[in-house]
Each structure stands twice: as C-alpha cells, then as structure tokens.
Image (cartoon, helix red, strand yellow):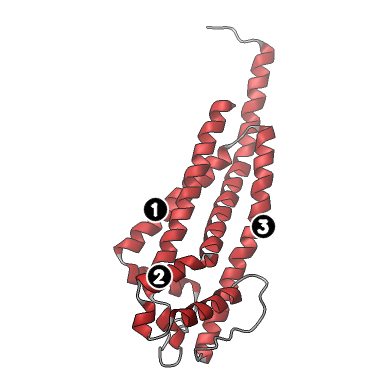
Amino acid sequence: MTPVRKGNHHVQQKKKKAGERSLPFQLLSGIILFLFIVSASVTFTLQLRPLYYADIRILDISENTGIDEETIKKNYDILIDYNTLGNRSELVLPDFSMSEGGRIHFQEVKVIFDFISIVLIITGPLTLILILYSRKSRNFLYLAVGGVISLAVPALLTVLLFADWDRFFVGFHHLFFNNDYWIFDPAQDPVINILPDTFFLHCALLILILVILGGIISLLFYRKLRRLH
C-alpha cells in the first residue's frame, strides 16, 4: 500500500466535503442558468420582428387576408410593443376590431411575457455572478447541469411538437390559460387572420433551437474549463 501523508489526506478530505456541500448550490445554479437561457430565448424571439415580416411573405398572409403588408406590419408592431415589459398602454389595433374575450386574452398573454422578462432581468445578473464566483471556486458543475437541462427539455418538447403540432398547440393553451378566450372567432377578432398557427410553430422552433444552442455552449464551456482546472 502506498503511504499517504497525513497533511495531504486532510486536504483531500476537506476538498471532498466542500464538493459535497456545494452540490445543492451547483444544482440550483444550473437551474438558474437554464431559466436564463429560456427567458432570453423567448424574449429574443418575441422581439425578432423580421421573423414575422418574413412569414408575411412565406405564408402568403397578405394574399390570404386581402390586407396590404404595411398594414399588417403596423398592427403587428403595435401588438409586440404592447407585450414589451414596461408598456402599460391599452392595446388598440387601428385596423382590427376586438371582442372583450380577445382583449382579455391579449392581457393574459402580456402577463406571461412580462413574467418571462422579469425572470430574464433576475437570472441575467445572477448568471453573471455565478460565472464570477465559479472562477474563484473552480467548480463549474452548474454549467453541466444547466446545459443538460437545456438539451433535455427542448428534446422532449420537440418530439411532442413534431408528433402532433395541433395537439401541442392546444395543450399549451390549456396549460397556461384557464379559459377559452384564446379560441378566436375571426368575425369578432379578425386579427387572428394575420396570426396563423404556422407562425407560432416557427416561433416555437426558434425558441427550442436557441435553448438547445445555449445548452451546447454551456456544456462546451464546462468541458473546456474542467480541462483547464
């Protein structure tokens, strides 16, 4: 048996106990990183207006509705401005009438987007603090935790999404809304005509791709930092 110096053995035991104590912290930090990646991905997609502008032509929205492209863009921009954190103005779409149920639904959607923006504002600085702290502690497990979650969750959602998009879309609304105001009647809420389901599919795919990309980057940094330290 190879002898071990008492001092070295004590140091090894101390490091082992410190690692065990930090595990819950690293798991929590990984979840914070995941929430940052998700909230950043959702917020980026919401504000990426060129995605919708491209879909106007790709999905022939103007031709299918008989509404010119500039009018569609104008009303869409108003809708996105309304869903931006800090905007407290009432939603008024100048070229579309709106039922009370439709107005309530848009208010509920804004609550969700505002919440996601707040999560981003909170987790952004926390993630930065974690990065700075991990450089001192040399424990980067949170990157692996956040990376794995950011790959696993989108992978599951992608399977469900491609298995049956319509069912996924309906299930999403049942999960986040406790009413049926999200079911628009084009006669009362004609704005739904310029918001086809396929556009929301494109948004969902972009969010999933961005989250997966965030997960891959986290795992690559984890691998690199482990080798360095």
Residue nearest the observer in this picture, 101 or 9: 101
Res 206 → quadrant: bottom left
Q: Which of marks 3 and 2 is nearer the N terminus?
A: 2
Name the side, left or right, on which 89 lies relative to 39.
right
Q: Which residue is drawn at 44% across and 88% down?
A: 190
From the viewer's perspective, is residue 123 above or below residue 191? above
Image quadrant in which the C terminus is located = top right
Q: Mark 1 points at which residue?
A: 155
The alpha-carbon separation of the residues under discs 3 and 1 comes to 26 Å
Q: Which residue is drawn at 68% across and 40% down?
A: 132
From the viewer's perspective, is residue 192 above or below residue 47? below
Q: Which of marks 3 and 1 is nearer the N terminus?
A: 3
Q: Which of marks 2 and 1 is nearer the N terminus?
A: 2
In this view, the mark in front (2 or 1)? 2
Rendering coords of residue 9 (x, y %): 64, 16
Other-residue count near label 1 (Cα within 10 Å), few / some / many at <14 / 14–19 / ≥20: some
Q: Do the residues labelled 3 and 2 touch (CB within 8 Å)?
A: no
Rendering coords of residue 64 (x, y %): 34, 82
Q: Is residue 172 visible?
A: yes
Q: Is mark 3 on a helix, strand or loop?
A: helix
Q: Is mark 1 on a helix, strand or loop?
A: helix
Q: Mark 2 points at which residue?
A: 55
From the viewer's perspective, is residue 89 above or below residue 8? below
**Which mark is on residue 185?**
none
**Which mark is on residue 122?**
3
Rendering coords of residue 81 (x, y %): 59, 74
Q: Which amino acid type is shown beneath numbered disc 1?
A: Ala
